Amino acid sequence: RAWMGGEGGDDAEGYARSWLEERYVTYHRGHDLSPTCVALSRDGQWAFSGAKDGSLMMWNVREGRKMACILPAAKCRGGGEGDRNRREILAIATSDDDRYLAVGGRDNCVRIFDVRALGRKSDPSSGAVPATPITRLEGHKKAVASLAFRPRTLDLYSGSEDRCIRRYDLNAMTYVETLYGHQSPIVGIDCANKNRPVSVARDRTARVWKVEEDSHLVFRPGGDVGSAECVCAIQDGWFVTGHDDGRLALWKEEKKRPVGSVIVAAHGYHGGASGVARSVMCCCALGLSDVLATGSNDGYLRLWRVSSEMFESSPCFQCLPLFFVYPTFVIPQCQQVSTAEKDAGITPLD
């Protein structure tokens, strides 16, 4: 079921409430401050959420309950916010084998937890004692803002506000190399099957890193396009970027410009068509499929169909009305491959 009406208003809110009543959508509480990032295990059984207060929660998706408080919320010391701000979690990622959970934040390091050990916690109240990471990967000089595992491997990439990308091998729990190139803080990173991660930063570029060749490709959307807020690898050689001016662009490695037309104001405008376009705050694809999801501050989750030879935006699906869409969400990897051979681009999904 999908909301096919306009944006906002009592009808949309009533429709969203009907989703809650029929339990198509459920909300869970546990953080003191706003959640900043979420991740799902590959089988969809576990969910993990991090927040501004530094807390990290583990949820049982099927039962709809909190399993454990991995990291408790940071408490203000002496009435100050400094300690709590430094504990803020900005990014989390899970490995494809559901073994490791990577956590990054304003403490400038990447913490690795063993999901199997966390899953043995059955009493959420026992989370008063923080879980111990199996290792801490240090080296970034500023906050770690994004994390991504390479599918079907234990290669982990971390993007930071220090403008660097660090690569780790979790088989040996070691640092491998640093990738340099961005001139501004990195805000998003993702990786498809090939060892070619794609990243976006405040320097208004997207970069595809040819790790084996020790080089990278630079993609610039154009002078009138805003800085990218998020990036998602659709499949090898294809990726999508969402921008702070509301644009949504599909890219192919062989081309330096977006494929076809760029979706303008993918989530509409503040205050009507004459207002400012809403930023695309997050995007995520169903692995090896043609399904893309985007979120913004309009309270809607929008689904899109991505195809490979032409770019068009005729709507066949509008959006899912939710009360809030936070800046990050993750969809589990799909179990089947879906191909689109007709036209290249992004269209709202039916």
Image (cartoon, rainbow, N blue to C red):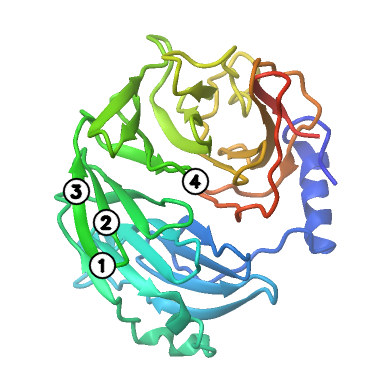
**Real-space Cα separation, disc 2 to disc 4, in angstroms:** 25 Å
Any mark on residue 168, and which? 2
Upstream in the sequence, badge 4 or badge 1? 1
Instruction: State if disc 2 and disc 1 touch (CB < 8 Å).
Output: yes
Secondary structure of residue under mark 1 = loop
Residue sitting nearer the eye, 22 or 197: 197
Instruction: State if disc 2 and disc 3 touch (CB < 8 Å).
Output: no
Is 214 above or below relative to 48?
A: above
**Real-space Cα separation, disc 3 to disc 2, in angstroms:** 7 Å
Outermost residue to the top? 223
Residue marked by disc 4: 327
The amino acid marked with disc number 1 is Met
Decide if residue 75 is in sight here: yes
Residue sitting nearer the eye, 286 or 183: 286
Upstream in the sequence, badge 2 or badge 4? 2
Q: Of the residues tagged 4 and 1, which is closer to the observer?
A: 1
The amino acid marked with disc number 3 is Glu
Q: What x and y, as percent, mark residue 317?
A: 79, 32
